[in-house]
Amino acid sequence: MTTIGKSIRDIQQLLKTKEISAKDIVKEHYQFISEHEPEIQAFNCLTEDLAFKQAEEVDQKIKAGAKLPPLAGIPLALKDNLCVPGYPTTCSSKILENFVPTYHSTAVQRLFDAGALSIGKTNLDEFAMGSSTENSAFKLTRNPWNTKYVPGGSSGGSCAAVTAGFSTIGLGSDTGGSVRQPASFCGIIGMKPTYGVVSRYGLIAFASSLDQIGPFARTVEDTAHVLAAMAGHDPNDSTSLPDWKANGENDFDALLESLPNCRDLKGKRIGIIEELSGQGNEPEVQAAIDKAAKTFESLGATVELVSIPRAKNALPVYYIICTAEASANLARFDGVRFGYRNGDMKDIVSMYNSTRQEGFGAEVKRRIMLGTYVLSSGYYDAYYKKAQQVRRLLCEDFEKIFKQCDFVICPTSPTVAFQFGDKTADPLSMYLSDIASIPINLAGLPAVSIPCGFGKGGLPIGLQLVGAPLTDARLLKAAYAFEQATDFHMKRPSLLAG
């Protein structure tokens, strides 16, 4: 009985009946990876010794008849900007190629405590800056649906690993859509929780006011399992919310119990974001969103067009704020404290310059320079301060909409996956790939990408479902109802056929 491509529920049933052991699960997944990883290139490194050690602990619990933790025996892929002690955490950058942290990311530690098995660290756009995973210093990760196409980014490695069956679940980081957009391109579930619900401790920062760790899975139920295990306040993260359950609203354990009964959306009001619909979307993408709206209506929801006026300003606001924060966060990578250092130097200034020139890739250097510019004397008020003011107005737009709607929807991305090289020569075109996901990060909202169709070339299309702050559990209930009314989540790329 194979566990490749199986759900958490199915794998744990096999474990409980002792039809398979946790060690067998690890062996099977590494065998599958050895056969297909040369084609997909999802991993920067595999963590085999850790996975087998964790599997042994699970098997010992089963042998002793102990109660299994909620993710016992479940293979997990980790984006390579999440710290795991004893293993490289490179951010897919030459400047951190040999960096090995001494501490755990809180989110990762919680998943390990829940019994998950660490399969490996996955490829990403360098320092999570990109929308295609083409900016990695090490390799090109490929879309399992068609290896001529990108998997999306920046969390393309984790997304491809889950899509290909290399792991059951995965973790990414989402700064402007870096979990949801690859989930859309690869036809799986990707979620960005409310900002502060999941600790950022141990996530190497890109833009601290925007970054949020989020899960990948093949079903909404599996997504809920991951979120239930890693959500919660963390004193190590000053932005972690102490009241993240919002008077019981975000009780994910209760959600998991009630999820099988979430089959309709009677009484719910869903808004279609006018500014992110129609013009600019590929025809197949817009058609899929229109069809999804009818599915929501068939489930009992009222669907109407709504306006988020400042959504059209989100892209420039985002690229001012995120580059400003990136320039501050990445100042620590100077060749002195850790990471790559150019040893051929005359003085400390030339060491700084040569280390950063050689250690950072083109996209990272572009964003550092932009961020330094908008924070510089004489430009701070005109750019950074103004962007923060518009960000506040965008939040107010969403606050007004959520007084009349339970959720809003739009495409996760205006296009399906594109071919390698199509957008690398035009950074602005690449940035537009995240135009529908960026407003959500600026407002700190929860959002989930759900498969809703297929476009040109048979490539997946994602629907983005967005909720008010701290309605993550309610959002997953709505996503589950949609998922159960369709069969898109059951489709698999050819390497998982059968």
Image (cartoon, helix red, strand yellow):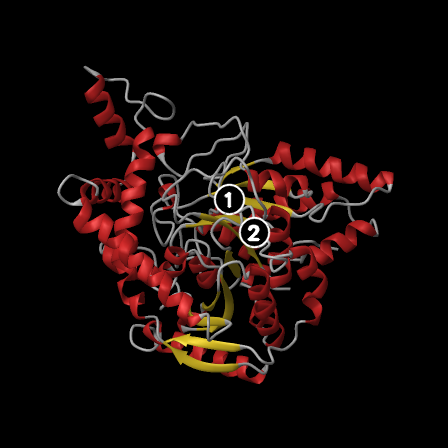
Residue at coordinates 57% horizontally, 84% vertically from top-left?
298
Residue 11: x percent and y percent? 72, 54
Residue type at mark 2: give it: Trp
Asked whether 400 or 473 is in front, the reply is 400
Name the residue beneath numbered marker 1. 240
Drawn side of residue 309 relative to residue 117, left or right: left
Does residue 445 lie above or below 55 as drawn?
below
Q: CA distance from mark 2 to mark 1?
A: 8 Å
Q: Tag count in the figure?
A: 2
Q: Is residue 222 visible?
A: yes
**The C terminus: image quadrant:** bottom right
Residue type at mark 1: give it: Ser
Residue 3: x percent and y percent? 69, 53
- Secondary element under disc 1, as helix, strand or loop, is loop
- Callouts 2 and 1 close, C-beta under 8 Å: yes
Q: Is residue 423 visible?
A: no
Asked whether 411 or 403 is in front, the reply is 403
Residue at coordinates 42% horizontally, 59% vertically from top-left?
181
**The N terminus: image quadrant:** bottom right
Drawn side of residue 116 relative to residue 14, left or right: left
Name the residue beneath numbered marker 2. 244
Residue 134: x percent and y percent? 35, 49
Does residue 350 lie above or below 483 as drawn?
above
